[in-house]
Image: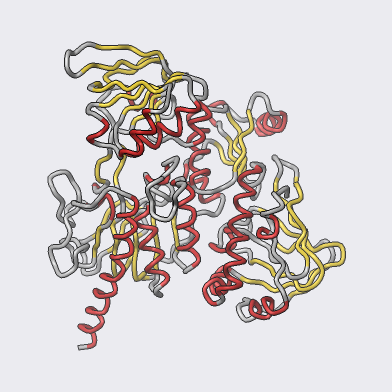
Amino acid sequence: MSTPDTRAPQMFPVLNAAQIATARRFASGPERHFAPGEQVYAIGEQDAPAWLVLEGSIDVVRRDGLNHEAPVTTHNAGQFTGEVNQLAGRGSIAAGHAGPNGCVALPFDPAHLRALMVGSADVGEIVMRALILRRVALIEQGGAGTILIGVPNSADVIRLQGFLTRSGYPNKVLDAAADAEGKALIERIGVLPEDLPLVVCPSGEVLRNPSNLQVATCVGMTPKLDPAKIYDVAIVGAGPAGLAAAVYAASEGLSVIVLDERAMGGQAGASSRIENYLGFPTGISGQALAGRAFNQAVKFGAEIAVPLGVKALDCTAERIALDLVGGQQLLARAIVVASGARYRRPAIANLAEFEGRGISYWASPIEARLCAGEEVALVGGGNSAGQAIVFLAPQVRHLHLIVRRSLSETMSQYLIDRIAALPNVQIHVGSEVVALEGDPATGLESAEFRNLADGTSRRLALHHLFLFIGADPNTDWLKDCVDTDDKGFIVTGGGARSLETSLPGVFAIGDVRAGSTKRVAAAVGEGAAVVAQIHALLAERSTTETV
């Protein structure tokens, strides 16, 4: 693995004798002897332990394309295998074999690895940093993990690539028409055009035009749920609020599960750069922030099931439960609704036809690559829109910003100042998008905008239109279980606890809550605050049951 010299010692640290002695206390089993060349763990293996090498070495390889392996590194005595998947018990991205002289190594299964993180601040910090940096390097290299074979820039390739990227999984796209390996596989298994894209999982399994959930299952992203288990806390939504609640609840010993039907990070996870979040003076991308929060939550033992949708809150029985997509039901002593909001869509008849084919609701590096050097338009005047403009403008030829009102009414001043300094951004105040033109098979070709003051229209030839026009609360799944305001946001604070809904034991935090401040910092704060209120609820119930 090629890494900068300054990062390599942190990525592949060597534990000293005292640190090895500390780590031994947390091992999940006795040391094992492996013969030269013997497989220690395989690509795609679920719950593969991290191994601390005591003698000899372990050679680590990753998938490089469809049928080839590439060396990653060799771990010698005092070094340990694994990356963040070992922490969560997900499918291994790499494989390990004992070196030429064999090896002796100690296993650390996911639970014992997490115990090491928490039980030894010194060694835990070294291991956690290394696991994260290794995942980052695998993503940068692009050859490990999941292979997508299809038409580059097609809607389904973009969908799957976006899902894997936002989930922090390395992936690589092969052109079905131009790449020799991709063409050979397609010809060998007789794939029809409607079967594309193909997804080759780390284990080698091949999926034909799969859903996000199918891909998540194939790479081992979604854990198997125990239908008999009752969690202390079930959190619906893996945005900043939900992840913060998971970190604080799990760190205080509560059993926690987080569910999200899309990807970790919520809407904030799609932000190219958040610059007004405390502690990050140079800013941080939403994906990076979500990734760090995810690793923290897993470190303390929280289970995270993504993508796994919640169909409904069942409040008809004595015990509240979550009805999941697929027919399962999940029980919890307390439920935290952090489902945030869904992207608002303008009332345009053929809008859905161009979603993923020119219409985007976020601006990630994938979208930026697709529209590089082109003329684009963006609709919206909030902070999310401002962050997207600052990210996109340097990469496109010209950007039209379409807003109903003055930016000063809806956007932070630092973003307004930065947009004003961009030479290729033209602001159209008092306009809205009213029509789209193009072929759904090939993509968007133009958009029509109307001036709200005089009713005149203007047509812009463009292939990419970004919509940041706000969001509506994602509360349909709650049915009539909790009170909401006239806009659908959840009302809280009717009882003794400020974040509890009208249904005891159900709490609401973040953007989905009526009256909340729609900022990442506020969402994180509510995620922390709700845990104290859950403790109070559980203590009351315990007292009542005892009496």
Q: Which colour scheme is used?
A: secondary structure
Q: Residue 292 location in percent, x, y? A: 49, 56
Q: Is residue 326 visible?
A: no
Q: In terms of depth relative to the viewer, which is nearer, 8 or 513?
A: 8
Q: Residue at x 63, y 58 (%)?
A: 45
Residue 162: horizontal and vertical position, in percent?
49, 39
| In this view, 490 is above or below 33 | above
**Residue for point 35% across, 62% down:** 245
Q: Which residue is drawn at 61% across and 33% down?
A: 149
Q: Quadrant of residue 226?
A: bottom left
Image side of residue 329 versus residue 16, left or right:
left
- The x and y percentages for residue 463 are 44, 19
Judging depth in this view, the residue of 120 and 211 nearest the camera is 120
Q: Is residue 461 above or below residue 291?
A: above
* Quadrant hosting residue 41: bottom right
Estimate the x, y position of residue 470 in percent, counting from the top left.
28, 37
Numbered label tally: 0
Q: Is residue 421 visible?
A: yes
Q: Which residue is drawn at 57% across and 28% down?
A: 152
Q: Quick one: which residue is furthest to the bottom in this view?
A: 547
Q: Quadrant of the C terminus?
A: bottom left
Q: Say left or right for 67 vs 383.
A: right
For residue 379, above or below residue 542: above
